Every structure is written in structure tokens, then in C-alpha cells.
Amino acid sequence: QKEVEQDPGPLSVPEGAIVSLNCTYSNSAFQYFMWYRQYSRKGPELLMYTYSSGNKEDGRFTAQVDKSSKYISLFIRDSQPSDSATYLCAMTPISGTYKYIFGTGTRLKVLA
Amino acid sequence: IAGITQAPTSQILAAGRRMTLRCTQDMRHNAMYWYRQDLGLGLRLIHYSNTAGTTGKGEVPDGYSVSRANTDDFPLTLASAVPSQTSVYFCASSKGRGETQYFGPGTRLLVL
């Protein structure tokens, strides 16, 4: 079993839709969670990060962490064609390691 | 420059040849990383360095070596390239352990 599971998609939604992207994980030591956006043939770009359970909002993006269920989500409101990309979740225990575990990414297409 | 630069952008290499991928950051981050990204496998850590002068092995270190002579530079060397090393290589950096990683634009390597 992989430490982090992420549905590869592709996920196609109409412009303006609310998008929900999710990852599940198995290691309860993970304490720091990140979401990256990766456009085709580009490097991953940090979108959001959070340490704690609950919600963190930044513009149209909301990151949600449920440590009891080992489940994290990224919500995109009012999705735009420019949001079309692959979204990667990543996580790490913070202390004692340089180990960062990435999901394989969910490919999102927002249709105009 | 701002952030992380990588060179070359892409390369076609004959099997058995030696190749060094370059990575430079100007954020004065202590930690640096090399990942490879392959379809369906996501980002996998090759080597890391928590500070100048020290390096460590990641998940897939075989066939690769790194050095960290100073804070800014973290080259990755393939001593004798093999076709299975065909991949996209990303360099990343973070302030320290367990902090957000920032990625370079990547090097696309094809080994024939």
C-alpha cells in the first residue's frame, strides 16, 4: 500500500464549478501538508500548506485536513480554464526526516 | 535570478555516457533535493542535502551521485547513464527539515 493515495483523474469540470481534489495517507506521523500545481512541462508550484487539522483559505483555494481520517482536500471555487493542471499533494512528518511523500497527482481540466 | 534554476532544460544522452545536471538556488535555503518524476510513479527522491557539505540517500539513489560544496549549488551526476534513467528531474530546496519545498523548472533527460 502506498503511503499517499491520490486519484489520477483526469477530472473534467465546466468553468465556474467547485473542484474537490483529495488525498488519503496511512502514516499518522505526517504533520505538514502541501498542495502543488504543476502545468504541463513545468515544475511543481506551491499553492498552499498547512500544519493543522481544519480549513485554510487563500483566495479561491481552500485546503482541508482531517488527521483523524488521514484525509486531505483542496477545494477550488469558481474554477477557471487556467486552473487546468495536475495537482499534487505532499506531506512530511516535519521533524527527524527529510522525507517528503508526494501523491502521484490528479489531472484537472476546466472546460470553457 | 530568483528561486531555483536548472540546466540543461533537456538532453538526449547515449547510454554509458556521464552527465551532470546542474541546480542553483538563490534563496539561501539550507536543504536541497533531487527528484525524478515518472508517469504513474510521481515524484521520487533521489538524494538530498540538509546543509553544505552533507548529503543523504533518498528512495532511488542507485546510479546517481551528488555533492554540496556550497549553499547554492547541488549538482546531480549520472556516472554511466542507462535507459531506465530517462525521466524528468527536478531540483528543490527548503529552508530546513519539514518546511515547504520549492521546485526548479526541471530537466527532461532521454537516455538512448
Image (spheres, helix red, strand yellow):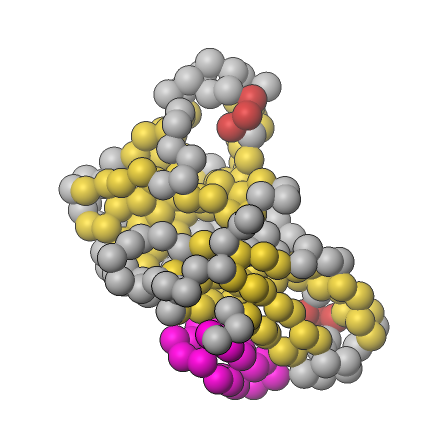
Q: Does A15 appear above or below B84?
A: below
Residue B100 appears in the picture as rendered: no
Closest to the observer, A92 or A3: A3
Q: Does B104 appear above or below B38?
A: below
Residue B81 horizontal/vertical position (percent): 46, 20
- Locate the C terminus of chain A and report the quarter of the image it occupies: bottom right
> In the picture provided, is A25 more to the left or to the right than B75?
right
> In the picture provided, is A34 more to the left or to the right than A8?
left
Q: Does B70 appear above or below A54?
A: above
| Residue found at the far left of this picture | B53
| Residue found at the far top of this picture | B16
Q: Is residue B29 magenta?
A: no
Q: Is residue A58 magenta?
A: yes
Please give the name of the residue rendered at 49% of the width and 41% of the height, measured from the top-left corner: B36
Residue A108 horizontal/vertical position (percent): 71, 63
Residue A2 horizontal/vertical position (percent): 54, 50
Please give the name of the residue rendered at 49% of the width and 60% of the height, measured from the top-left corner: A26
Closest to the observer, A99 or A39: A99
Please give the name of the residue rendered at 45% of the width and 54% of the height, measured from the top-left corner: A101
Q: Does B45 appear above or below B13?
A: below
Closest to the observer, B12 or B37: B37
Q: Magenta segment, which residues?
A: A48-67
Residue A109 sits in quarter: bottom right
> In the picture provided, is B65 more to the left or to the right than A9?
left
